Image (spheres, rainbow, N blue to C red):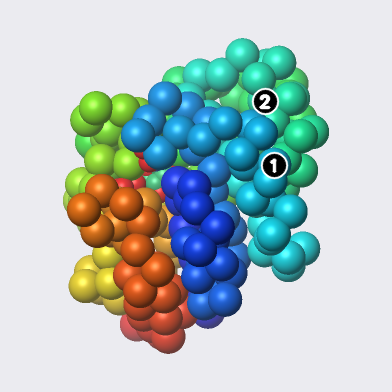
Amino acid sequence: MVKVKICGLMEEKHLQAAVDAGATWIGFMFAKSKRQISIERASKLAKLIPSHVQKVGVFVNPAEEEVHNAVEAVGLDYVQYHGCEGPSFINNLGYPAIKAISIRSYEDVEKASHYDVDYYLFDAPGTNYAGGSGHVFDWSLLDELSIPKNRVILAGGLNSENVSRAISQVEPFGVDVSSGVEKDGSKDSDLIKRFIETATTTSVLK
Ligand SMILES: O=C(O)c1ccccc1N[C@@H]1O[C@H](COP(=O)(O)O)[C@@H](O)[C@H]1O
């Protein structure tokens, strides 16, 4: 079954909807974004998350100190690097890591092979911010991967209408969504439930 990450949660009711519907990862956005959350607020919300659901902190070119503080205060299980962080920066920090890579071309896909991380998150390039644009990239660029599929998380403009197609085509380990579970600019519990149900009931076998 495909794993699901719901990203950019800021309110208790939406977090609860994601947990109840079976999310594997909950993402807190610490980088500059309309979904940015403070460490204090994320720490409070994190206390409501059961231990089988993993907490991911999303950063864009952070200072090391910033990452250490958030991991400790929030109890993050993974750090998602969504900027231009290099392999040595990520390795030196030493936390379980997800490296996001913006995909415009096959050369971008190949950048994944430079990193030794737990998961590779392939996303569309950002517009106002480094990610969370709601745009889809050309999934066929992932047809020939040099990294194992069980390390791939697909992101970028996913929603309950296109996620089944995305899973059938890319066969990722997980999918990640932010804008696609929002209504009028805010997260929506029904959209979160529908997305998780659709993704987790889609067969990964072609
Ligand atoms: O969500 C944001 O605002 C954001 C800002 C800066 C870096 C990453 C961000 N979000 C990440 O992008 C993916 C895809 O978002 P979407 O589904 O296309 O809206 C999202 O899941 C976050 O991991």
The residue tagged 1 is 43
Q: Quadrant of residue 111?
A: top left
Tell me the residue at 67%/25% (across/down): 67
Q: Work out whether residue 92 or residue 68 is closer to the camera in this orientation and state it.
A: 68
Mark in the foreground, 2 or 1: 1
* In this rendering, position of residue 42 left or right of residue 133: right
Q: What element carries label 2?
A: helix
Quadrant where the image shows the C terminus: bottom left
Picture coordinates of residue 9 (x, y %)?
48, 50
Identity, as a three-letter code, of the amino acid under mark 2: Val
Picture coordinates of residue 37 (x, y %)?
52, 35
Decide which of tag 2 and tag 1 comes sooner along the chain. Answer: 1
Tell me the residue at 50%/19% (across/down): 61
Picture coordinates of residue 191 (x, y %)?
33, 70
Q: Quadrant of residue 124?
A: top left
Q: Can residue 52 be seen in this view?
A: yes
Q: Is mark 1 on a helix, strand or loop?
A: helix
Identity, as a three-letter code, of the amino acid under mark 1: Ser
Q: Can residue 114 be seen in this view?
A: no
The residue tagged 2 is 67
Label 2 CA crowd tier, 10 Å (few <14, some 14–19, many 20+): some
Distance of label 2 from label 1 (alpha carbons)? 14 Å
Question: Would you say the beta carbon of the disc 2 residue lies within 8 angstroms of ligand 1?
Answer: no
Q: State ligand 1's quadrant.
A: top left
37 vs 152: above or below = above
Tell me the residue at 27%/35% (across/down): 125
